[in-house]
Amino acid sequence: MRNVTYSMNTSLDGYLVGPDGGFDWAAPDDDVFRSWIDEIREVGVHLLGRRLYETMLYWETAEQDPTLDESKLEWTALWKSLPKVVYSNTLSTLQGNARLASGSLVEEIERLRAEPGEGDIAIGGATLAAEAAASDLIDEYRARVYPVLVGGGLPFFPHDERRVDLELVETRTFNSKIAYHRYRVAR
């Protein structure tokens, strides 16, 4: 069965974006960016909320940017070819290899798990991840923890007053002092 993963950058105090909506503190260095490339290679389909989809639209045409280095071009090629399912109440058209979700998140994940296919089912976006977590659909949490306290904003982890036991699968510290933690949900 395909794993459902939730992987994002987070501040040490647990936020994806700060109170002002900014995430300039989360710019990855080359080492961290390479880890994102390695991770996206393992993904078969990416489920995104509207905000993250709109943030990631840059990568649909990024190859046109003459300043991109080899790793950014590699990411662009991987991202563009990756099937994406977008959850939005406001968008009616999408760009690239993306489609609007036609059913609930639970239905979509159950359908994707039942279909033959390779790679993880990645969830992007805090709101979508909170919904998946509330339905106990996430198999792995992956956090790149940046050494910054932003004091509030959009939390990485859903706050639904539900205990979830986790098993540490992998940990790594990058040269930039960013820590990567990968946890599997203990079932």
Image: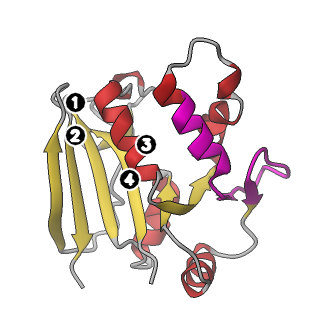
**What secondary structure is found at the residue carrying circle 2?**
loop
Where in the figure is residue 158, as x and y percent of width and height?
A: 36, 60
| In the rendered image, the vertical position of residue 89 relative to residue 38, given as above or below | below
Mark closer to the observer (1, 3): 3
Specify whether residue 98 is painted magenta.
Answer: yes
Q: Mark 1 points at which residue?
A: 149
Where in the figure is residue 10, as x and y percent of width and height?
A: 31, 41
Crowdedness of circle 4 by 10 Å Cα count: few (<14), some, many (20+)? many
**What secondary structure is found at the residue carrying circle 4?**
strand
Q: Distance between the residues labelled 1 and 3?
A: 26 Å
Q: Name the residue under label 2.
A: 13
According to the image, what is the colour scheme of the structure?
A: secondary structure
Mark closer to the observer (2, 3): 3
Q: Which of marks 2 and 3 is nearer the N terminus?
A: 2
Mark closer to the observer (1, 4): 4
**What secondary structure is found at the residue carrying circle 1?**
loop
Residue type indicated by callout 1: Leu
In the image, is 122 to the left or to the right of 147? right
Q: Earlier in the sequence, mark 1 or mark 4?
A: 4
Crowdedness of circle 1 by 10 Å Cα count: few (<14), some, many (20+)? some
Image disc number at residue 37: 3
Residue type indicated by callout 4: Ser
Q: Which of marks 4 and 2 is nearer the N terminus?
A: 4
Q: Mark 4 points at which residue?
A: 7
Q: Distance between the residues labelled 1 and 4?
A: 19 Å
Q: Residue at x 59, y 36 (%)?
A: 76
Where in the figure is residue 120, as x and y percent of width and height?
A: 46, 67
**What secondary structure is found at the residue carrying circle 3?**
helix
What range is drawn magenta here?
73-99
Residue at the limit of the structure toward the top, as seen here? 67
Q: Which residue is drawn at 50% across and 19% down?
A: 69
Q: Earlier in the sequence, mark 3 or mark 4?
A: 4
